[in-house]
Amino acid sequence: MPLDALPSTRLEAPNRMCAQPVADATPSGSRPLPWFVIASHSQAERRAAQHLAQQGYQTYLPLCAIKRRDRVVRSMFHTIQVPLFSGYLFTSFDPHENWRPILYTPGVFSLIRNPDGKPIPVPQRALEAVRASEDARRTLTPWEPLWRPGAACKLAGGGAFDGHDAVVTAVHHDRAVVALLMLGHLREVQVSLDCLAAREG
């Protein structure tokens, strides 16, 4: 059983919390706090988000809708919400204050940091692109000839990013800009539309 599997009556609130883009944790009259990447334990993204929120941290767990085959009736499929970046989520905090409790939060495996131990902030533009496409990823729509911003995908074609989960943030003719997490770093890269494959369960 996944670590973040909770009774259905308790999953509803965390799902709504995780699926909605959150407002910046900005104290009145001050600059927005930066966002950072959290690596969770296997299948514990929701658990980590829930416990971080209980400690007062702003969290953001990007989700996407996929079809998954029923384990009993193999001809039946269910639409479910899964983390967009498996094993990762985002949290916001002041890096000048004590952020060490994050490392000991249930569900958290690590905080992405530099070799000197300092947390690495997420590029604001890339994170905003992911957050802006949240609504488009929450439902399954029929595939169209052209990919659209907000579509969850997997990179294919044998390149350096082959196999990575991603989300389309822009499309220009025969190329797309996608956001993906690579080694814990959120990046935007440009790829050919031929390198995009449907995200499957």
Image (cartoon, rainbow, N blue to C red):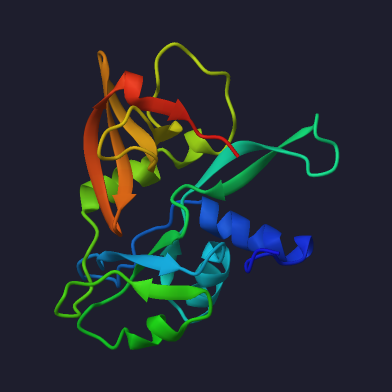
Please state if 145 lies on the left or on the right of 123 as rendered: right
On the rendered image, what quadrant is the N terminus found in?
A: bottom right
Vertical relation: 11 (above or below) 81: below
Please state if 62 lies on the left or on the right of 71 as rendered: left
Q: Quadrant of residue 37?
A: bottom left
Closer to us: 29 or 57? 57
Residue at (80% x, 34% y) in the render: 74
Vertical relation: 177 (above or below) 45: above
Q: Position of residue 131 (x, y in %)?
A: 38, 46
Q: Position of residue 130 (x, y in %)?
A: 36, 44
Vertical relation: 149 (above or below) 80: above
Residue at (61% x, 46% y) in the render: 81
Closer to us: 126 or 78? 78
Q: Quadrant of residue 140?
A: top right
Residue at (38% x, 26% y) in the render: 196
Q: Position of residue 104 (x, y in %)?
A: 44, 85
Residue at (31% x, 41% y) in the render: 179
Please state if 136 lies on the left or on the right of 98 as rendered: right
The single residue placed furthest to the right in the displayed view is 73
Q: Position of residue 49 (x, y in %)?
A: 51, 68
On the rendered image, what quadrant is the C terminus found in?
A: top right
